[in-house]
Image: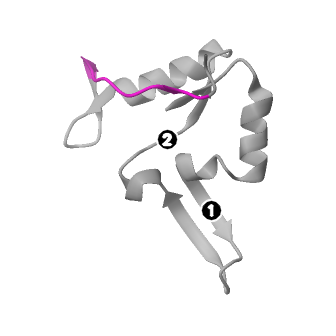
Amino acid sequence: MAFLPSAPLDVDAAIKTGTAFQLLTVQDLLFSHPAPGGHLQRLQPVGGLVDAFLADTRNPTDAQIWFDIWSSVKGPDGEIIGGVRKGFLEVIIGGS
């Protein structure tokens, strides 16, 4: 998970130019090049070994949603195990 810095314009520019996509997980991706184009359900950095999504720490609800998702532990049946938490890596982009 990557948290946005307090200056979102730099992050917006990275998204608009596409430079951020190499570091993020992208879902439901439609592409036209190379021809004939196609669809990818999920594209992840580091050869698919990393899940990386943006969260805005200025929005407490957004940050809490991601915390709950990434710290939850699922059992073999895919259901969340209540009261059990795991750690995850937080990356701050553009922080000082």
- Residue at which label 2 appears: 52
| Mark sitting earlier along the chain (1/2) | 1
Q: Given the image, on which type of amino acid does mark 2 rest? A: Ala
Residue 29 tag number:
1
Of 11 and 38, nearer the camera is 11
Would you place residue 74 above or below residue 44 in this image?
Answer: above
- How far across and down, in percent of the image, does residue 96 sit? 61, 16
Report the residue at 68% width, 71% height from top: 31
- How far across and down, in percent of the image, does residue 69 sit? 43, 29
Identify the image's colour scheme: rainbow, by chain, secondary structure or one colour.
one colour
Q: Given the image, on which type of amino acid does mark 1 rest? A: Leu
How many numbered markers are drawn? 2
Residue found farthest to the left: 76
Report the residue at 49% width, 41% height from top: 52
Left or right, residue 4 beside residue 83: right
| Residue range of the region highlighted in magenta in the rendering | 82-93
Q: Is residue 68 magenta?
A: no
- How far across and down, in percent of the image, does residue 57 sit? 62, 17
Of 29 and 18, nearer the camera is 18
Residue 68 tag number:
none
Would you place residue 14 above or below residue 54 in this image?
Answer: below
Q: Is residue 91 magenta?
A: yes
- How far across and down, in percent of the image, does residue 11 sit? 72, 35
Of 59 and 82, nearer the camera is 59
